[in-house]
Image (spheres, rainbow, N blue to C red):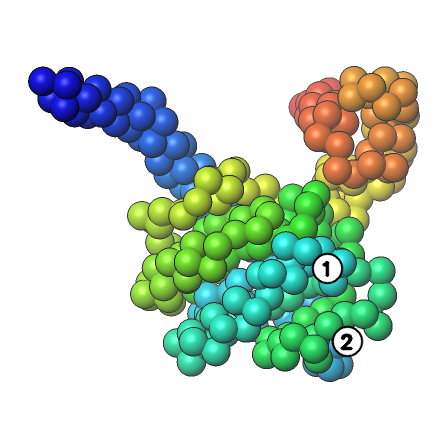
Amino acid sequence: MVGVILGIVVVVGLFFVNKYWITPATTKAAKAGGQFPEAPGFQVTSLSGNKIDLQAYRGKVVLLDFWATWCGPCRIEIPGFVQLQNKYGSQGLAVIGISMDDGPAPVREFYSNFHMNYPVAMGSDKLGMLYGGIFGLPTTFLIGRDGRIYAKHEGLTDMSVFEDEIKELLAAPPNRKVADFRTVGYTAAKQIQTSTPAEVNSVVPGVDVSKLSPAEVKEYEKVLSQEKCQCGCGFSVLKCRQVDSSCQVSLQEARAAYKKFVKSHHS
């Protein structure tokens, strides 16, 4: 009788776990992944002096890894990426490493010691901003054959997660969106943010002001300089954007002010 009761308790418990935890998480992952934004293009030079143009990788599955030599979890993941490149490179996988180290010297040594078999280039804050900002390392993106970002993983991630997603993307035809792609792991379910070069290189980082005249840009900057940022930094919205482009509060305030400014000047 006790065993029967315990069995019922377990079944009921699994029901509620599935209903209130697993199922909502899966649904959230599917909804978050439904956007699958285009991967922002970029050109960098690898440690070996070769140009890396993301556009040239169209048709391949790209694992784009932002990392650093001083990052412990990065050091744990990289041997796995070497193995993935060996295993799936002939099938269309291309691993690209973007080092966020301050200089190339330790990266070259690390590259040699870890027998890395894929191109590595030095990164920058602006490159990271194209991909929504790199706020922790490692941060890894999986880009499909069609050039869309299908998954984002922050922090140490098991290689089986990457491998499952890579196999799913490799099986897809080139230049076709994998509409039913399902990310693996909870970190991949986070909404993927991207930016355009015009937003990254703007005088107001994160806001594309290219449609404004020079005089209007100055006027818009004046508006932001008179608004206090609500993030608690004590700066104006303009100053906060310029000193901390990762601040999401000032970004939303600057974009809201831009919409209001354009509406009042161009309607």
Q: Name the residue under label 1.
A: 68
Q: What residue type is labelled 2?
A: Glu
Q: Residues within 10 Å of mark 1 (few under 14, many from 20)?
A: many
Residue at the disc numbered 2? 109
Tell me where residue 136 appears, x and y as whole percent. 68, 45
Front in this rendered view, residue 150 or 187 = 187
* Residue 255 x/y as whole percent: 70, 29
- Which of the 4 image quarters holds residue 252? top right
Q: Residues within 10 Å of mark 2 (few under 14, many from 20)?
A: few
Name which residue lies at 74% across and 63% down.
69
Left of 171 or right of it: where is 47? Answer: right
The x and y percentages for residue 183 are 40, 47
Name the image quarter holding residue 259.
top right
In this rendering, the answer to whether 72 lies above or below 28 is below
Give percent across and percent down for residue 135: 70, 43
Residue at the image position 45 percent from the left and 37 percent from the top: 32
- The answer to whether residue 57 is visible is no
Q: Can residue 161 be seen in this view?
A: yes
Q: What element carries label 2?
A: helix
Residue drawn at 47 percent across, 59 percent down: 159
Say which of 71 and 52 sits in front.
71
Q: What residue type is labelled 1?
A: Ala
Quarter of the rendering occupied by the C terminus: top right
Name the element at disc 1: loop
